[in-house]
């Protein structure tokens, strides 16, 4: 009778672990360094698949879900600076490596956008808090204000109406910051072409 082979005496879990270490591409959870970065998390074959964290040599860190090697699902993107600070970039939904769905973007100038995305562009409904204090609430298309919206400037002026390609275009109402004048009109590329301006009433009349 032949003596038992070494693998016959080892638990299956140990054999599987040995196999993954030697093959380098089996499914499971592991950490792997590569030129320019590191990935730690779940794998499916040769590709990140499931939850994992990837960090590049430039400091970019993605933490979230993967599908066949691409960012897909819920995840966050941030940057680790050399001085130890962490800069938030994006938190939300991804599809095939691109921002798609609902998410929050943090811009270098201090502006913040929260809303809908499609293929890395703001598309759908969203809110933009501008760095100067202005706010836009409304519809977006191809990364620009487009459709119905409300724009409140840093000076307190308000515009409610149509936008196109990032500009006031179409019918709208402009409320001046002094609160005494309301301007109904038609805009084209941020310029009011025609309007009806209500004047403040003289209380002495």
Image (tube, grey):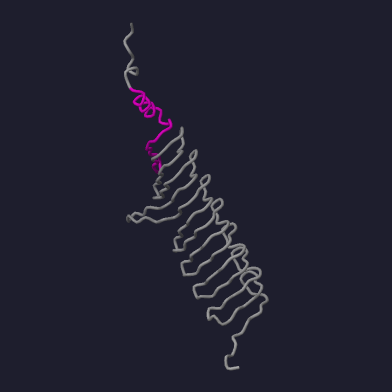
Q: How many marks?
A: 0
Check residue 32 for magenta coloring: yes
Question: Is residue 103 depicted above or below 10 in this figure?
Answer: below
The quadrant of the picture occupied by the N terminus is top left
Question: Is residue 65 depicted above or below 179 in this figure?
Answer: above
Asked where in the image residue 175 lies, by quadrant, the reply is bottom right
Question: Is residue 200 depicted above or below 31 in this figure?
Answer: below
Asked where in the image residue 43 lies, by quadrant, the reply is top left
Residue found at x 39% / y 29%: 20
Q: Position of residue 134 (x, y in %)?
A: 50, 69
Residue found at x 37% / y 52%: 80
Quick one: which residue is furthest to the bottom in this view? 204
The quadrant of the picture occupied by the C terminus is bottom right
Quick one: which residue is furthest to the top in this view? 1
In depth, the one of 101 and 193 nearer the eye is 101
Check residue 130 for magenta coloring: no
- The residue range painted magenta reads 11-39
Q: Is 161 on the left or on the right of 104, as rendered? A: right
Asked where in the image residue 23 lies, by quadrant, the reply is top left
Q: Position of residue 30 (x, y in %)?
A: 38, 36
Q: Position of residue 96 (x, y in %)?
A: 53, 44
Question: Is residue 65 depicted above or below 160 in this figure?
Answer: above
Q: Position of residue 136 (x, y in %)?
A: 53, 66
Residue found at x 49% / y 58%: 114
Q: Is 105 on the left or on the right of 192, as rendered? A: left
In depth, the one of 72 and 37 nearer the eye is 72
């Amino acid at each position: 009778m032949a003596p038992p082979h070494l693998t016959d005496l080892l638990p299956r879990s140990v054999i599987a672990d040995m196999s993954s270490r030697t093959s380098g591409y089996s499914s499971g959870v592991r950490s792997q360094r590569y030129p320019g970065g590191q990935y730690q998390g779940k794998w499916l074959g040769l590709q990140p698949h499931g939850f994992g964290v990837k960090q590049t040599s430039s400091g970019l860190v993605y933490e979230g879900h993967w599908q066949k090697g691409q960012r897909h699902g819920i995840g966050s993107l941030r940057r680790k600076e050399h001085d130890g600070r962490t800069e938030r970039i994006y938190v939300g939904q991804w599809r095939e490596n691109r921002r798609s769905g609902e998410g929050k973007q943090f811009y270098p100038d201090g502006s913040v956008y929260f809303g809908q995305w499609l293929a890395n562009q703001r598309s759908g409904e969203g809110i933009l808090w501008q760095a100067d204090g202005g706010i836009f609430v409304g519809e977006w298309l191809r990364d620009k204000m487009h459709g119905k919206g409300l724009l409140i400037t840093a000076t307190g002026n308000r515009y409610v109406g149509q936008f196109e390609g990032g500009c006031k275009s179409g019918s709208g109402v402009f409320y001046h910051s002094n609160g005494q004048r309301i301007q109904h009109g038609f805009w084209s590329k941020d310029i009011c072409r025609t309007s009806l301006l209500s004047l403040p009433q003289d209380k002495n009349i």
